[in-house]
Amino acid sequence: MATADVPIQSRLRESIRTEVCIIGAGIAGLSTAYLLGLEGRSVVVLDDGLIGGGMTGRTTAHLTNAYDDRYVEIEKLHGAEASRLTAGSHTAAIDKVSEIVTREEIDCDFERLDGYLFAFSADDLDLLDDELAAAHRAGLVDVKKVPRAPFESFDTGVALRFPRQAQFHPLKYMDGLARAIKDGSGRIFGQTHATKIEGGSSVRIETSHGPVVSSEAVVVATNTPINDRVAIHTKQAPYVTYVIGVQIPKGSVTRALYWDTGDPYHYVRLQSDERDRYDVLIVGGEDHKTGQANDGSERYARLEQWTRERFPQAGEVTFRWSGQVMEPVDGLAFIGRNPLDDDNVYIATGDSGQGMTHGTIAGMLLTDLIQGRKNKWEDLYNPSRIRVKALPEYASENINVAVQYTDYVTAGEIESEAELKPGSGAIMREGMSKVAVYRDEAGVVQKYSAVCPHLGCIVAWNSTEQTWDCPCHGSRFSATGRVYQGPANSDLSAVEE
């Protein structure tokens, strides 16, 4: 989903040395590379795809300090001071994006606007009052209760207005960051898959096609860490979220960010058509655990129904896509030194649906840590933290993971590859093994081990995205077995006939 003119270099051709190596050319990786470059550090960014080609390219790009896990919950789990730091960090992230856009003259449709949180149902009205009080205690004293969100087509009832939020075109912003990095002392290499990451006095990053990067520090910013087996993956869970873009008459909906209190919640924003002919109403929601549902078409239909019931001016659905978010069990991202690893190995993960601000926070926080400076958010986002009050959620998510291993003893979804239609996949049992079987559009059948190479869960077919998805920790593979989403860092093994 990256744009065609992204200023990315070809794959890494020879072994090199740099001060900092960053794995992942998403918002967290490029923000960190850019800010380190301003400090005069030499930086190399590696990505096995294109800039913004992962989850950054699938965001709806809400830049907000209206926390989606709610300040009521953050205060309950982490305390009042942590809630204030959370609000302050996301506010600072929005300001930092604005500063970078101005400094680098990035034409990315950045604009400040209000955000509105409204009740999904009458049962949630008390939640709005509680959240208003918690937001004020967190320092967001400009948040106000208003009679309704500014929709003319339907009455939301009372809403909370969060001022000075923002939005932008994420890929245009990433283009600008990449150009600035390359204009400085940074280098960016695509089509370069990092296969092994070792910390120590000198970090060593091996790549699949041979060249090695040596550095003083490494940042793994691959949405979810590809260098961990267990440490972080038991503390966050992968969820798929769905988005549609609907044409509406220009100016028929007030430009703002909107969220309801549903679970999963709906999120709404506007994007102008490139030729300024109409607006696109971008609506998201209908989340579910990755690999644990295969009904994307139904979820898109429910999103469209929700939209048309509230916006009768809605026209053609011109876009639809899905993305994956990592939900930490205690609501806060994991940014800092990687647990159980050398001190010069850093990670950024756990975006919790607010990847654009969390990714920018990662850039600011990791730059300070690598530069040896104290940062007031260090303890808040420490990946090694354990919050006792989050243990019930921790247990619930990991029980869910444990249940997925029972797929080893179940029957396959098909008994024979002959049952597969072109362009489809399914799990089939062959003796004691589970096999992921895919028939391409030409009718050619390909078989792969259904065992995820991360921790051995059985993958599931995603007919909407044409991928194999791991229901345990969110690894995702193309129809032909190529890994493109961690924590797995290798492909599904081909099964020889």
Image (tube, helix red, strand yellow):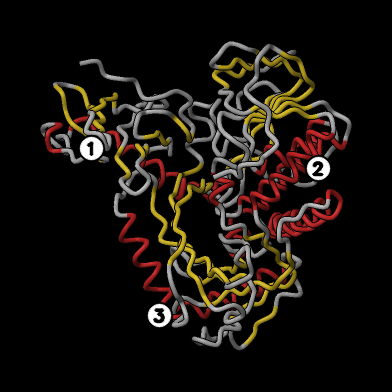
Whether tag 1 and tag 2 are in contact, CB under 8 A, the answer is no
The kind of residue tagged 3 is: Glu
Q: Residue at x 34, y 55 (%)?
A: 296
- Among the two numbered marks 3 and 2 on one chain, the one whose residue lies closer to the N terminus: 3
User: Which circle marks residue 309 in the picture?
Assistant: 3
Q: Are there few (<14), some (14-19), or many (20+) residues within 10 Å of tag 2?
A: some
Q: Is residue 322 above or below residue 121?
A: above
User: Would you name the residue on which mark 1 appears?
Assistant: 426
Q: Give, as a three-letter code, the residue at label 2.
A: Asn
Which quarter of the rendering shows the C terminus?
top left
Q: Position of residue 379 (x, y in %)?
A: 72, 42
Q: Earlier in the sequence, mark 1 or mark 3?
A: 3
Please identify, in this view, whether the residue under mark 1 or under mark 2 is nearer the observer.
1
Question: What's the distance in space between the residues labelled 1 and 2, CA to CA?
Answer: 48 Å
Is label 1 in a helix, a strand or a loop?
A: strand
Q: Quadrant of residue 94?
A: bottom right
**Measured along the vertical axis of the image, is residue 259 above or below residue 202?**
below
Q: Which residue is mark 2?
A: 375
Q: Residue at x 36, y 28 (%)?
A: 481
Q: Which residue type carries mark 1?
A: Ala
Which secondary structure, mark 3? Answer: helix
Among numbered discs 1 and 2, the one appearing first in the sequence:
2
Q: Residues within 10 Å of mark 3 (few under 14, many from 20)?
A: few
- Quadrant location of residue 204? top right
